Amino acid sequence: MNNPPETARVNTQNLLDFLAILRVLRARTRFIFLTALLFTLISIAITLMLTPVFTATTAVLIDPTIKQPLDLNQQSRSALTESIRIDSQVAMLRSDTILRPVVRSEKLIDDTEFGSGVSSGLAGLLLEVLRPTTSSRESSQQDAENKALKALADATTVKRDGQTFILSISVDSKNPSKAARLSVAIANSFLSDQKRQLEQASNQVTSQIEDRLIGLRERLRLAEDSVQEFRAENNLQVGAEGGLITEQALAGINSSLIEARGALAAAEAKNTEIQRLLRQGADAESISDAINSPTITQLREQHSEAARNVANLSAALLPSHPSLIMARSQLAEVQQLIRDEVVRIGDSSKISLKVARDRVNNLEADLESARSLNNVDSTARIRLRELETEAIATRTLYENALAKAKQISALDQVVVPDARVISPAVAPESPTWPKKKLIVALAAVLGVLVGCCAAIGGTALRLLKARLTNKYEVLAYNSALSTRMATSERQLGLANEQAGAEPTRRVAKHIDRRLTTAAPLSILGRIPRMIDPEALRSGVARQSEEVDNVRHALDLFYYEEVDGQDAEFGRAIEKIQERIDQLAEETDARVALITAPDTNQGQTMLAFAVAFSGACRGLKVLLVDADPLQKGLTRDLDGVAARRRQTLQERVREDPELGISFVSLIAGQSRYKPFELSGKATRELAHITRNYDLTVIDGPLLHDLSSDAPLLAVSDLLLVALAEESERAASSQELAARLNKLAGDRPHALLMTGS
């Protein structure tokens, strides 16, 4: 036999596929059923041993529409404020203030479920005799009450029903009646505490307002005393109308002065008119109506009568007639009387004018005196107004506080609780825990799952054991076959020496005829490593450090004249670019897939170096990360894991700093799963690469590629990174045969990396 019959089949299949799993489950149905039955029986036994717990719930409504009598503003609160207030009430219901009265009223200290309990009979008497002293007993009593309080708090659950104003108070207990009683007791304790708090707040407000009134009353008295004392000290007396006497006197003098000046002006006008008449001869016809004198009026009438009589007689009689002479004599006498009266009135007007002028002068002097006094008292009046303002403000504050106190004193005994019980708890009929049916059902499901896992796991272990056994058998078989072939070679060599033949070539054909037909691999270039590979293997250095060194070296090589290691690295990469340019001209190879037979061969470093150097040479470059084992490029160039939910075109990221485009095909994928690329993603990638002069793919390892791999379908050039210490593998016909098979008619070559 040349090879064992089961070797090829076992080594090329998975341990279990989906159909094999179904067959295993079908074959182990009885085992799975027994496992599920066992879990079900165990769950039934456990539920029978568990003590049931009953839950009773009381619903309490916090009514936001109720306003307290002391809430005089009656302002509606916002929805946020009400929500915070309700949440505060939820936390308050489990507080010491609410639960401690329930512990005392329900005597939970002596309850066996919540407290320590009290034994009866002989044991109880012994405990009573052995109980410690009074101080220790009080401390023990306090500890027992705190313990019962904590147990009640743990058994109480308070929650708000959605966004409503209803609070549910639930209490867990082994006794359904006790659970209902405690739930109602907690609700009543809450309502009592609410009412007590409102009463205390009312009493405190009343007391504080009364204390405030006493202080305000004393403050008002002192303010008014200060006003009176200041007025007395500065002679700032108040008149009948409420103003100061000096101010009222000043106003009176000013009014009198205005009247006196008006009278003086009238007297001057009258005197001027009279003096004019006197200068003109005081003709009766020219006497002005401005002289309002009864005597003048009467004399003017007599003058008119005499003048009319003279005129009549002159028309009828001769000038020497006695009647005419008498009439003219009477007329002259009346005229003389008028002149005498005007002279007398002129003298009287002069006297009146002097009196009016003296009165104006006196009033002006009094006004100046009043003004002087008013100016002297201006500072005192300013201080007086300050004291009066303070007194008025104090009085207003006192009156408001007094009115508020009277209103509160009438309402302080009226307290309206804003919470009420809308659904008191009743004793529950069924326990809330344990849910026996649910536990049994879940146990049955768990038993089925455990049975399935045990059946599949056992079968998988047996298959794995068989695979390992077959592997060792194959190794032993190959070793024995090699020994037999070596022996046959020596025997054939002896025979051929005698026959004059070439034994080596015939034996090689006998060993593996396929390997002799494999084409030798060409080396595209040798590139020095920018970091010690041993440091990468030991974890001392990171892949990103080597990539940074590559970028630095290429920047110096393409944009500055440098020597040393950076120049050596740049020249090596430039030669590779020239070879790729030649292949692009000959075969239109624009997509290069870089892989490696193993990790730490410099694959990622080469992919980044080729892409970045192409960008430095002015090409439009796309760098693709498809290596799930080393995600250094994805972490450094695009660490956004959320991009895997986008399309491949949307995930392409332009890096203006590097001058290249980048897309990750392995973002979010596990490094322990083989790389997979869907047909749609393959078509998208092929479409994207058409827009670039050069596409470099950092691909998976060589043994993860197959002849129908999607990345090979997209690629035009296959490059294999190989470390210098693995250079002997470059002449391996097995590696050459594998690359020739994968590449097909595509160009392919090695990229050697060294120190």
Image (cartoon, rainbow, N blue to C red):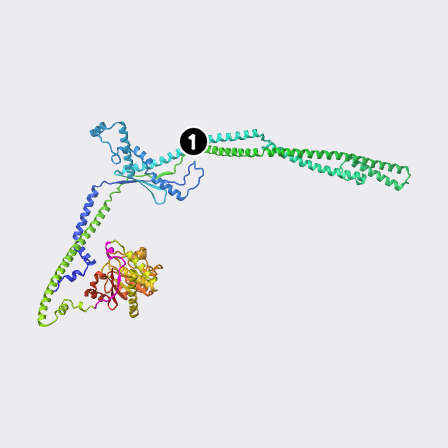
Q: Residue furthest front?
A: 563
Q: What range is drawn magenta here? A: 519-538
Helix, strand or loop at mark 1: helix
The amino acid on which the numbered mark 1 sits, given as a three-letter code, is Ser
The answer to whether residue 560 is magenta is no
Quadrant that contains the N terminus: bottom left
Residue at horizontal 62 percent and vertical 34 percent from the top: 372
Q: Is residue 306 left or right of residue 105?
A: right
Q: Position of residue 127 (x, y in %)?
A: 22, 29
Q: Position of residue 230 (x, y in %)?
A: 55, 30
Q: Position of residue 216 (x, y in %)?
A: 48, 31
Q: Residue 156 occupies which quadrant of the picture?
A: top left
The answer to whether residue 530 is magenta is yes
Using the image, determine if residue 229 lies above or below residue 270. Answer: above
Quadrant that contains the C terminus: bottom left
Q: Is residue 367 left or right of residue 405?
A: right
Q: Position of residue 700 (x, y in %)?
A: 25, 60
Seen from the viewer's position, the closer of residues 574 and 306 is 574
**Residue assigned mark 1:** 207
Q: Residue 341 occupies which quadrant of the picture?
A: top right
How many residues crowd mark 1 within 10 Å: few (<14), some (14–19), many (20+)? few
